[in-house]
Image: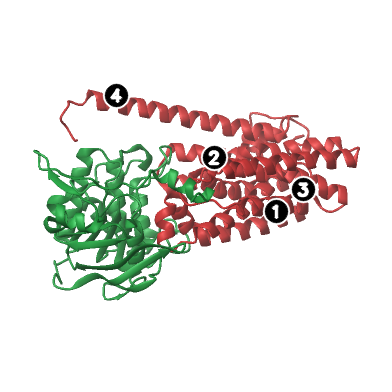
Amino acid sequence: MPPAERSGTAVRFTDAAVQVGGRTIWSDVNLTVSSGDFMAVLGPNGVGKSTLIKAVLGLIGLSAGGVTVLGRPAGQSGKEIGYLPQRRNFDAGLRVRGTDVVSLGGDGERWGAPFPLGDRLFPERRTARARVREVIDLVGASAFADRPIGEISGGEQQRLLIAQALVRRPRLLVLDEPLDSLDLPSQASVAALISKICREQGMTVMLVAHDVNPIFPYLDCVAYLAGGGAVCGPPEEVITSQTLTALYRTPIEVLRASDGRLVVVGEPEPPARHADRHAGAAGHP
Amino acid sequence: MNAATSGLSWNLVADVRQLFLFSFMVNAFRAGTIVAVLAGALGWFMVLRRQAFAGHTLAIVSFPGAAGAILLGIRATVGYFAAAIGAALVIASVPRSIGGTTRSSESAIIGTVQAFALACGALFVSLYGGFLSGLTNLLFGSFLGISPSQVIVLLAIAGAALAALALIARPLFFASVDPDVAAARGVPVRLLSGLFLVLLGCAAAEVSQITGALLVFALLVMPAATAQLITARPMTSFWLTIAIGLMVVWLGLTAAYYSVYPVGFFVTTIGFVAYGLAAAGRARAARSSRRRLMAQPAGGIA
């Protein structure tokens, strides 16, 4: 696939706001992702990063403003978006090969059953199978794709799930915390893989992350969500003390450790999520 | 040549001919074949989805179903299916959130349904009074009393259930393996889960007519669990499940014919042996592959 249409806009939010259960999660969000860009959606827990992703997928509607995805209103570009939900672990006893999980990315939702020995009768089955092999090669998973998916490591599973999202040659790849709960070496190698896919396939990537460091060297732009709003721009402009202080409306410091890692100090982390929920359920003031 | 009265001989052809001499045996083989295929197909998905407990409960409720039907003077078959499908709908009505956080509450509800169903069965049996020999058949199965019309009913229901399963097989597989992505892709995960339980109820009701309500596991779980241990290729393990199910039923019926013991015992024992062999083989393969990994010089593939 040629690295085409770098100039266009893949995703654009204009003055967007979202309400969930009557509560405004964020508002006045203006955000643009150019085609072929690698964008990270950053911010502390509970600020609505996954909500932003759901708005891109058209799974929830906006309460104000608009969002266009690949030139259409959100929710109308289904097959052109590859989506990787927040990390799932496969049951260790699941006796299904990685290859089978990847091929579900191609035709998993089609009604019917695979006809036995269909490969000989239907050429398109052979094409589909070749495509599955191709994406497994692309993510470097050939060595373990034929093992039961429950028996391989988290990083290996994540590579296969990325392959699954790529089977249908999407133009936009949306990943929700793909690096969460991976060990550090796996985080680095999966981040490098996503960047490689973005560059080589000319694919736009939106990635939700909790920690910017493993992906920082690859990013074209970031959207930083906090305090009910968002700033968007090149990473070295957004992840600065001034920008984040303005966003959070409280003093924030961005420090660079001696190994180059960025540390954000002073982030007002919301109270632990479960405590928050209890307060809501019990109706405490 | 008095094949009809003699027992097992060394002449295999004569043995098989003797097996099919009586129409009740022919009917038993027909019914057993239908049941093995249906139970294998649905059991394969049940094992994949980790819903063995639900499957067991759907089988157990066929006992009060049949006992109630006999008490009311209707055909037992009607009772089997009414109870199993009713219970499937009850279990399916429990919200099962994607990601499996409410699985514990699902199993609690299934257990409650199962206990209540068994209690109802006990009540129906005591209300009916003198039906104790029938009770053993309901619980542990019988292959003697299957009529040609029953075979046709079994065939019709199995055909409908398998056709429905074939229609939803691929998205059901997707929803079983990877429910989150399936839901994001527009697969109706919840609806499929309910539909599957109803189909599983049909299978459980059919199987319990042969193996009895307590030994349905023999045909629902054992072949599928064995096949999934042997191979991780979905298509291969699916067809292997059906092959193992057929083998278990045919051998079980043959053994039961030449002995005085209940068919459920033989079917279960053969299934158990097959599973034990597969599990031992898997453990051995895992051990030897571990040894190979250990023997490999460090610094190979990361």
Query: The residue under label 1 is which amino acid type?
Result: Gly
Picture quadrant of residue A16: bottom left
Mark 4 against mark 2, which lies toward the viewer?
4
Q: Which residue is mark 2?
A: B223
Mark 2 against mark 1, which lies toward the viewer?
1
Give me the chain that's red: B
Q: Residues within 10 Å of mark 2 (few under 14, many from 20)?
A: many
Query: The residue under label 2 is which amino acid type?
Result: Pro
Structural distance between the alpha carbons of marks 4 and 2:
29 Å
Q: Which residue is mark 1?
A: B86
Q: What is the drawing colour of chain A?
A: green
B124 displayed left or right of B189: right
Q: Which residue is mark 4?
A: B291
Residue drawn at the location 59% of the way across and 32% of the way down: B270
Residue B74 visible in the picture:
yes
- Spot occupied by residue A131 in the image (x, y as percentages of width and height): 27, 59
Structural distance between the alpha carbons of marks 3 and 1:
10 Å
Query: Mark 3 or 1 closer to N-term?
Result: 3
Residue B209 against residue B277 in the figure, above or below: below
Query: The residue under label 3 is which amino acid type?
Result: Gly
